Amino acid sequence: MLQSMLRGKGLIWGYAGLIILFLLPLILPRFYIYIVSIILLTGLLATSLNLVLGYGGIFQFHHAVFYGVGAYATALMLTRTGLSPWISFIVGPIVSAALGLIMGMICIRLSKLYFAMLQISLGSLVWIIVYRWYSFTGGDDGIHGIPLPEILSSPNGAYYFTLIITLICFLIMYKIVKSPFGSALQGIRDNPVRSEMIGINVKRHQLLALIIAGFFAGVAGFLFVVVDTTVFPDMLFWTLSLEICIMCLLGGWFSFFGPMLGAAIIIVLRTFVSTFTSYWTLVLGILMMFVIFFLPNGVLGYVEEKLHKGLIEPVIKE
């Protein structure tokens, strides 16, 4: 009964949120539509990380490299080839998934901190190639003025495209999390030794999770190209990966929608703070300390815990 009540309330809030999201371009100025678009694609990026971090227990600490590679692959296809833009949008996520496969095959033999350190090293290698290869990637200048199809050239067109693709990706990732594969992944997170003993191929499941996460990070990357029409090397830098991790922790890394909430908080806070000071990283560090000490399960985890107690305690007293 408790679960059905919570599910019913969640559906009501979900439908209300969708209606509001589709009506936003009618009531908000262009700048705020841009911010909401960035929140959507960043939330998708953070959720793709949480697929391996929160649900898989894999210490992927340089997830931004897949985001940046997806964006650069899309931008290069759009600016250097005469192929259809829609093909370019598909190429970006595929290249990111391929990078996830390559890096996964190299790192998967290690675990926990060793996996994280090797992945950070490989990700930094990709970043320096993009940063220094002026003749191909534009180097530290990036790529600007990326041409887009006419339907996506307006802010509203880019927003609705981002919203629809994000919703589709969220639905797919939710199905993955609730599938037998997702259950096996969570079992590996909780106890990899026991999972291996009952016949689950731990490394294969983890590698597949890395490929899936890389693919959806690449989707977020090509959506950034649609929204901003530019790419730059900082998209692959490790500091962005740290921000994405904080989004997962802040929103709740054991909750499916937690990373989206964390992304919304971080993007809004960064936009607000940047108008007053350039010390955003200091604010981010203070926020991280606050989460570690006071919200170890994130904002959604805290809310769910309070709701659960609020609904359970009256039943127990009766």
Image: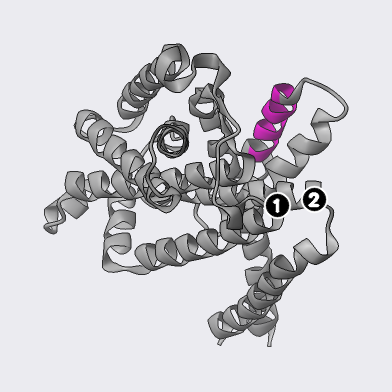
Nearer-N-terminus badge (2/1):
2
Name the residue rendered at 25%, 35% in the picture. 104
Circle 2: is it few (<14), some (14-19), or many (20+) Cα within 10 Å? few
> In this image, 185 relative to 77: left or right?
left
Screen quadrant of the N terminus = bottom right
The residue sitting at the right extreme is 276
Name the residue rendered at 59%, 58% in the picture. 151
**Magenta includes 101?**
no
The location of residue 109, given as percent across then percent down, is 19, 32
The residue sitting at the front extreme is 82
Viewer-side residue, 159 vs 189? 159
Quadrant location of residue 132?
top left
Query: Mark 2 near mark 1, Cβ–Cβ under 8 Å?
Result: yes
What segment carries the magenta color? 281-291
Viewer-side residue, 193 vs 247? 247
Viewer-side residue, 49 vs 150? 150
Can residue 297 be seen by looking at this rendering? no
Circle 1: is it few (<14), some (14-19), or many (20+) Cα within 10 Å? some
Name the residue rendered at 45%, 48% in the picture. 85
Instruction: Specify the amino acid type for callout 1.
Output: Pro
> In this image, 201 relative to 166: left or right?
left
Q: Mark 1 points at which residue?
A: 155
Q: Name the residue under label 2.
A: 30
Instruction: Specify the amino acid type for callout 2.
Output: Arg
| SS class, disc 2 | helix
